Image (cartoon, rainbow, N blue to C red):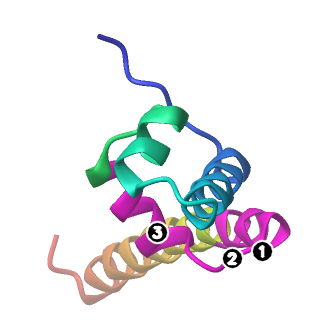
Amino acid sequence: MTRKRHKPEEIVAKLRQVDVLVSQGRSVADALRSIGVTEVTYDRWRQEFGGLKSDQVKRLKDLETENLRLRRAVADLTLDKLILKEAASGNW
């Protein structure tokens, strides 16, 4: 069985759909079955994306991507600095 990767905007839409179905009187299990996700996935999505709007989710993902890029850049520069420091001290 292949896993489907949902986009953040799709996740927010599905969370809202579950909220609407539950407010109409359906059980959470039935609502989850209708959108095609498990309870574990639903709980994980609610923990990460609960209460956010689509534009906020897109901004969050962009910031996480930028943060990862900057962390890699800092790691590379730190490594270069350590190499230069060791070379300057003559311990090579």
Which of the two labelled residues, at mark 3 and mark 2, occupies the earlier sequence position? 3
The answer to whether the residue labelled 2 contacts the one labelled 1, judged by CB atoms less than 8 Å apart, is yes
Quadrant of the snapshot with the C terminus: bottom left
The residue carrying pointer 2 sits among few (fewer than 14), some (14 to 19) or many (20 or more) residues within 10 Å by Cα, namely few
The residue carrying pointer 1 sits among few (fewer than 14), some (14 to 19) or many (20 or more) residues within 10 Å by Cα, namely some
The answer to whether the residue labelled 3 contacts the one labelled 2, judged by CB atoms less than 8 Å apart, is no
Residue extent of the magenta highlight: 41-63
From the viewer's perspective, is residue 11 above or below residue 51?
above
The answer to whether the residue labelled 3 contacts the one labelled 1, judged by CB atoms less than 8 Å apart, is no
Q: Nearer the viewer, residue 91 or 21?
A: 21
Residue 28 x %, y %: 40, 56
Q: In the image, is residue 46 part of the stretch drawn in magenta?
A: yes
State which mark lies toward you, 2 or 1: 2
Residue on which disc 2 sits:
52
Q: Amino acid at mark 1?
A: Gln
The secondary structure making up most of the magenta span is helix
What's the distance in space between the residues labelled 2 and 1, CA to CA? 6 Å
From the viewer's perspective, is residue 37 above or below residue 21?
above
The secondary element bearing badge 1 is classed as helix
Residue at 62% across, 62% down: 65
Residue on which disc 1 sits:
56
Residue at 57% across, 55% down: 18
Q: Amino acid at mark 3?
A: Arg
Q: Would residue 8 appear left or right of 40 to someone viewing this image?
A: right
From the viewer's perspective, is residue 1 above or below residue 59?
above
Q: Would residue 69 appear left or right of 28 to someone viewing this image?
A: right
Image quadrant where residue 44 sits: bottom left
Q: Would residue 89 appear left or right of 48 to someone viewing this image?
A: left
Q: Amino acid at mark 2?
A: Leu
Residue at 49% across, 65% down: 72
Residue at 68% across, 72% down: 60
